[in-house]
Amino acid sequence: MTLFSDPADLHSHRVRLVLAEKHVTVDIVDVDPLNLPEDVMDLNPYGTAPTLVDRELVLFDSRIILEYLDERYPHPPLLPVDPVSRATFRMYIYRVEKDWYGRVDTILAGGKAAARARKELGESLTASAPILAAKPFFMSDEFSVVDASIAPLLWRLPYLGIELEGSASNTFNAYAARLFKRDAFAKSLTEAEREMRL
């Protein structure tokens, strides 16, 4: 199995985190998204990272990769077993991508829209703090793919210039500490991601 991964990208980071949680042996090839190797261009019609190659199978959407890994390597399970809970967790992942990842992309692009996206992301995170206070992990007692999607975002908050305040800050700091102390999280970090926190 080979993962072509952008060492600074949220989507690649969450795939690396799930691979580490599952203890999957994988060759991780760091790629520059602006200068992708021909291998990736041949495999992936969209020319994006992450791109996962498992024998004859090629996957290039991070959400699909996460679900594939959870089904291919069922232990530990990172999605619930029953269909209703599983669908609910998939909706949480969709909302993380739509509401939070989309704003990160706007912030990183810079320009006039970045300041507004930074404010909106901070407000959206603050509004979700009570949900995180209820359980050790996102709406669950166990680490899930939702947490694997949120952890890379929380790691980047200082880099993005986002500082939460008050009780929301305390809630997120406690939640982030639980995520960041996991062995898999430490293994998922690239050098570029470590530098984001220096």
Image (spheres, rainbow, N blue to C red):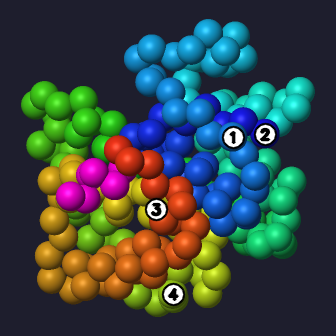
Q: Which residue is mark 4?
A: 136
When the figure is inspected, residue 173 is found, relative to residue 49, above or below; the finding is: below
Marks 3,2: beta carbons within 8 A: no
Q: Residue at x 54, y 61 (%)?
A: 187
Whether 139 is among the magenta residues is no
Marks 4,1: beta carbons within 8 A: no
Question: Which quarter of the image is occupied by the N terminus?
Answer: top right
Which residue type carries mark 1?
Answer: Asp
Q: Earlier in the sequence, mark 3 or mark 1?
A: 1
Q: Earlier in the sequence, mark 3 or mark 2?
A: 2
On the question of residue 121 being in view, the answer is no
Q: In the rendered image, which quarter is residue 192 located in?
A: top left
Q: Which structural element holds mark 3?
A: helix
Q: Nearer the viewer, residue 123 or 176?
A: 176
Q: Residue at x 38, y 48 (%)?
A: 191
Q: Which residue is mark 2?
A: 1
Q: Residues within 10 Å of mark 4 (few under 14, many from 20)?
A: some
Circle number at residue 150 = 3
The part of the chain drawn in magenta is: 193-198
Q: In the rendered image, which quarter is residue 84 located in?
A: bottom right
Q: CA distance from mark 3 to mark 2?
A: 25 Å
Q: Residues within 10 Å of mark 3 (few under 14, many from 20)?
A: many
